[in-house]
Image (tube, helix red, strand yellow):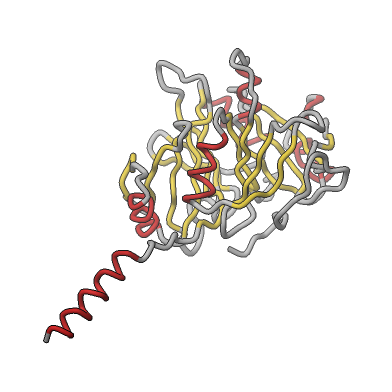
Amino acid sequence: MKRACAVLFFLATAVFAWPQQRPAITGIAFVRVYSRDAAASAKFYGQTLGYASSKAGEITRYPVNDLQWIEVAPLPSPAPASRLAAVGFMTRDARALEAYLKANAVTIVDPLRKGRFSVRDPEGNLIFFVQEAKGAAVPPAVPATAVSRRMIHTGFVVHNADAENHFYREILGFKPYWRGGRTDTSIDYISQQVPEGSDWLEYMLNTNSNATQKQLGGSNHMSLGVEHMPDAIAKLQKNGCTGPECSASKTGRDGKVQLNLFDPDLTRVEYMEFKPSGKTCCSEFTAAHPTAVENR
């Protein structure tokens, strides 16, 4: 009897002592931005970028593909400095991930409800985790006018990379992808991919404390992937994008061709080719590049 009790005690102790495993985090689910003018935002995301939309309360959703979408929410009062409201990541088990984060002393802001919950990262950014499901995550279907059908990264201002790394890399398991800067000797951008996918989060370092709204919106951004930039430019022009910015592609510091547009509230939407075609500065890539259709 004593031996049986001892065995049961050992097994129970082992179960509680075993570190909880993190459920898979497979990619970006959505990026939410604030809008001062709903009609102007609808023209930008609907007409210029070519997406269809649906409503969820006050939020307008623009599906990019079955697993990703853009959310546009009314600008609150008083208006925050950043127009980037939230970022959502997809997980294969939202309930288990919520329990895992609680076990790692992460405070839950919005408890799990309807397949999603939220936390705040060390910089105060609102981060959602969304349950991956079969079929389209949000309606409607993506139309042929869409310039891109793949969101590949998002980025925001970061003041303390070490604190963010503890959360994203040590707790959540994000993996290094690339780092670089405005010069060959500076580090202004640090990218890390989700642990079970190739979408990435970019720390935008050294942003001026007196940044203008456009400069801040340039840092707090989202990126839509394309195979060939000339094809994306042609689609933008077909959608009625005629200003000089609509064809002003360039090669970024990471060697990838990019084109930057700003929505009416000056949040940057960056079109980017999936793979580098030019010289890559500062560091080598340390993980696989995203593709047009990702098997999660």
**Residue at (80, 29) in percent of width and height:** 183
Residue that sits furthest to the left in the current view: 1
Q: Quadrant of the C terminus?
A: bottom right
**Residue at (42, 63) in percent of width and height:** 21
Q: Position of residue 23 (x, y in %)?
A: 45, 61
Left or right: 112 with respect to 46?
Answer: left
- Foreground: 213 or 200? 200
**Residue at (71, 33) in percent of width and height:** 187
Q: Position of residue 235 (x, y in %)?
A: 77, 42
Residue that sits furthest to the top in the current view: 210
Depicted 251 relative to depicted 64: above or below: above
Q: Position of residue 261 (x, y in %)?
A: 71, 30
Depicted 110 relative to depicted 150: above or below: above
Left or right: 286 with respect to 200?
Answer: right
- Foreground: 117 or 148? 117
Residue that sits furthest to the front in the current view: 2
Depicted 15 relative to depicted 114: above or below: below
**Residue at (50, 34) in percent of width and height:** 72
Q: Please tell me in which quadrant of the rendered image residue 70 appears.
A: top right
Left or right: 270 with respect to 17?
Answer: right
Q: Quadrant of the N terminus?
A: bottom left
